[in-house]
Amino acid sequence: MKTHTSYLTFNTKKRQEIIDITEEVEKCRATAAINEGMVLVSAMHISASVFVNDHEPGLWKDILDWLENRIAPWSPDDYRHNSGTGEDNAAAHLRSLTIGHEVIVPVTKGKLDFGPWQRVFYGEWDGQRPKRVLLKAMGE
């Protein structure tokens, strides 16, 4: 089995951003030279996510609005985590839990095996500081 591990580092300008990382996932696959297998993509922080969805900025805005208005509003005084730690990012932890922190992308015949509009995204929910994503390609 062939493997390759690489890391991405993000230091976003905004507290919350969605970033398309599909090309970086493909670079990891190509470096490993795998034709059949998978690439694991995992956020290494508990206030960030990795997910697969459509590359459409209107959808990204919908996701951010959904997280803010229905899942975990950025309201620091409403969370026990914030009062217990002195931090203000409990909402980011809940957003990460909701969206998820990793995906596995299948590789078939030397290509990332996606549906027609699927791409891989990094979701930053508490940015403006360095955070990493692990990419691990495995296969033959």
Image (cartoon, rainbow, N blue to C red):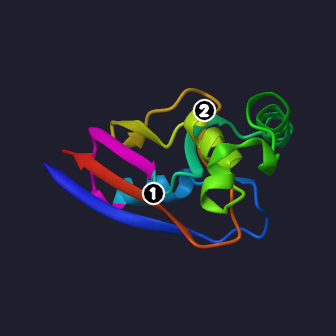
Q: Tell which of 77 and 39 is nearer to you.
A: 77
**Residue 3, percent across and down?**
22, 55
In this figure, which residue is indicated by the disc labeled 2? 98
Residue 48 seen anywhere in this rendered image of the structure: yes
Q: Is residue 97 above or below residue 10?
A: above
Q: Tell which of 19 and 114 is nearer to you.
A: 19
Question: Which amino acid does the dot numbered 2 rest on?
Answer: Thr
Counting other residues with Cα less than 10 Å from the Cα at mark 1, is it few (<14), some (14-19), or many (20 or more)?
Answer: some
Q: Is residue 79 above or below residue 125?
A: above
Assign the C terminus to one quadrant of the image: top left
Q: Tell which of 62 and 22 is nearer to you.
A: 62
Q: Measuring 59% from the left and 51% from the top, which residue is drawn there?
A: 48
Q: Tell which of 51 and 110 is nearer to you.
A: 51
Q: Measuring 61% from the left and 54% from the top, which residue is drawn there?
A: 84
Residue 78 lies in the magenta-colored region: no
Q: Measuring 85% from the left and 36% from the top, which residue is drawn there?
A: 65
Residue 35 lies in the magenta-colored region: yes
Q: Is residue 53 above or below residue 91?
A: above
Question: Which amino acid does the dot numbered 1 rest on?
Answer: Met
Task: Give SS at disc 2.
Answer: helix
| Badge 2 or badge 1: first in the primary sequence | 1
Q: Which residues are magenta?
A: 31-42
Label ID, residue 44 = 1
